[in-house]
Amino acid sequence: MSCDLSTDLSSALGRRTFLQRLGASVGATVLAGCHHARAEHGTMTGSPHALPPIGAELFTVRAAMQADVDRTLVRVAAIGYREVEMAGYFGRSARDIRDSLRSAGLVAPSALVSLGTTPDDWVRVVADAHTIGHRYVVIPAVPAALRQTLDGWRQIAERLNHAAEAAAQAGIQVAYHNHAKEFVPIDGRVPYDLLLESTDPTLVALEIDLYWMTRAGQDPLTYFARWPGRIPLVHVKDSLGPPAHPMADVGAGTIDWRRLFAHRAEAGIRHCFVERDDAPDPFASLAASYAYLTRLDVPCAVSDPCSRVMRGM
């Protein structure tokens, strides 16, 4: 999904006015930082071996969604999923999407969205998120022109901070979704690290795509430890390994899911979304990944906060 940050959110509309208009659109509520402990739908409970809720990223079935939203959602629910992440609304209104999700027995805690080019665009994004019931809106892409320099990444960080502050007035958390390009150094710095350091961790959360981070040669556990509690969302798809890293259904590749998910509480993971961009049979891919993950028994690492539950602390 493309995202255009080329217009500063505060340039066309004063910051205070923007917040007032957003509040009038959806009703203002205060959102605490994503790393603060709180009760919400999908919070990990029960056995310390249990994974957070396993959802489906609907980009996987985008062609089917384009053809028939309602039938696609029913088929996803029939696999066993109860959560999905939206990747566009396929020409449907926010109310229609909300009703279709309810009819299929699904909830959508998050959605991939674009910041757009004007403050009004962002007002609509947040209002739609509120209507559908998203808790998170996720930015999956930034303009190529801004990705070329460290100063461009600083501009991205500033705009994410402004957008996240506005969204928080409606009880919506902004998150950033990585690919591999954020890890290509510029002038000796890793842009992803600069972005995380330059955004407010109480406002801008992370949706780590574990495949893309692995493909970039990074260890997700490094980021779990560096930014504990800042990662409420993850994308889950597998890799057949270097050098090309072909995508695979979860469990059919080389990524060590037990190792990663053993540190789920440290990261703050609340929702896992299965995705495969290039699945030959998208529904079969979702089913295979779901079956693997629901069978996966993952004790918490000794260093992970959830290990206290296992020790009876």
Image (spheres, grey):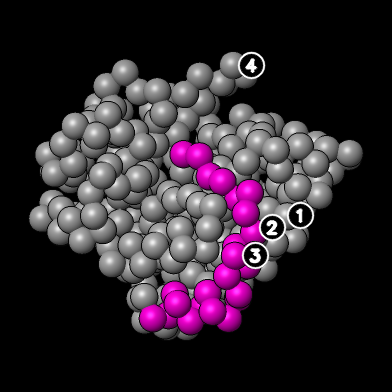
Disc nearer the start of the sequence (3/2) = 3
Residue for badge 2:
157
Report the Cα–Cα distance between label 1 and label 3: 17 Å
Under mark 2, the amino acid is Ala
| Label 1 Cα crowd, 10 Å radius (few <14 / some 14-19 / many 20+) | many
Q: Which of marks 3 and 2 is in front?
A: 3
Image: magenta residue range: 1-24
Q: Which residue is drawn at 49% across and 70% down?
A: 167
Q: What element carries label 3?
A: loop
Report the Cα–Cα distance between label 1 and label 4: 31 Å
| Label 2 Cα crowd, 10 Å radius (few <14 / some 14-19 / many 20+) | many
Under mark 1, the amino acid is Arg
Res 143 quadrant in image: top right
Whether residues under marks 3 and 2 lie with C-beta atoms below 8 angstroms apart, the answer is: no
Camera-nearest residue between 235 and 60:
60
Res 145 quadrant in image: top right
| Label 4 Cα crowd, 10 Å radius (few <14 / some 14-19 / many 20+) | few
Disc nearer the start of the sequence (1/4) = 1
- State left or right for residue 234 relative to residue 90: right
Report the Cα–Cα distance between label 3 and label 2: 16 Å
Q: Is mark 1 on a helix, strand or loop?
A: helix
Residue for badge 4:
243
Disc assigned to residue 154: 1
Camera-nearest residue between 127 and 306:
127
Residue 175: x and y, percent?
53, 58
Whether residues under marks 2 and 1 lie with C-beta atoms below 8 angstroms apart, the answer is: yes
Relative height, residue 144 to residue 192 (above, below): above
Q: What element carries label 2?
A: helix
Residue 245: x and y, percent?
56, 21
